[in-house]
Amino acid sequence: MPKPETKIIPEPVIEKRGRRIFTTDYKLSIIQQADACKHGEIGMLLRREKLYSNQLAQWRREFAQNGVAGLAKSQPGPPPTKTPEQKGAL
């Protein structure tokens, strides 16, 4: 008896995820919640919100330097070095 074909076809909408966008209010809320945390509770906050510690550190730095205006827009990552066509040729 031949095995049934088990080919999985992923949905492109699900596979392609964009970057998360954090509002100024959200960033400020996370900073305030982190400041209210006791020793050892920040990790739980970050896991619950699915954030990295460097994001919190960057938001704190931006807030300390420029206040709420500093949280308005973070710098994106480095520009891509390859075009989509070059990435597909791998």
Image: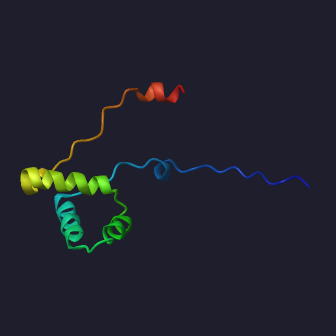
Asked if one can make out residue 89 in the rendered structure from this viewpoint, the answer is yes
Given residues 56 and 20, the one toward you in this image is 56
Q: Quadrant of the N terminus?
A: bottom right
Q: Please tell me whether residue 88 is drawn above or below residue 24 in the rendered image.
A: above
The image quadrant that residue 29 belongs to is bottom left
Relative placement, left or right, of 33 versus 42 is left
Residue occupying the point 17% across, 58% down:
24
Q: Position of residue 17 (x, y in %)?
A: 42, 49
Q: Position of residue 15 (x, y in %)?
A: 49, 49
Q: Position of residue 80 (x, y in %)?
A: 35, 31
Asked if one can make out residue 21 in the rendered structure from this viewpoint, the answer is no
Residue sitting at the far front: 39
Q: Quadrant of the C terminus?
A: top right
Relative placement, left or right, of 38 versus 9 is left
Residue sitting at the far right: 1
Residue occupying the point 32% across, 53% down:
20
Residue occupying the point 9% across, 57% down:
68
Residue occupying the point 69% across, 49% down:
7
Given residues 3 and 34, the one toward you in this image is 34
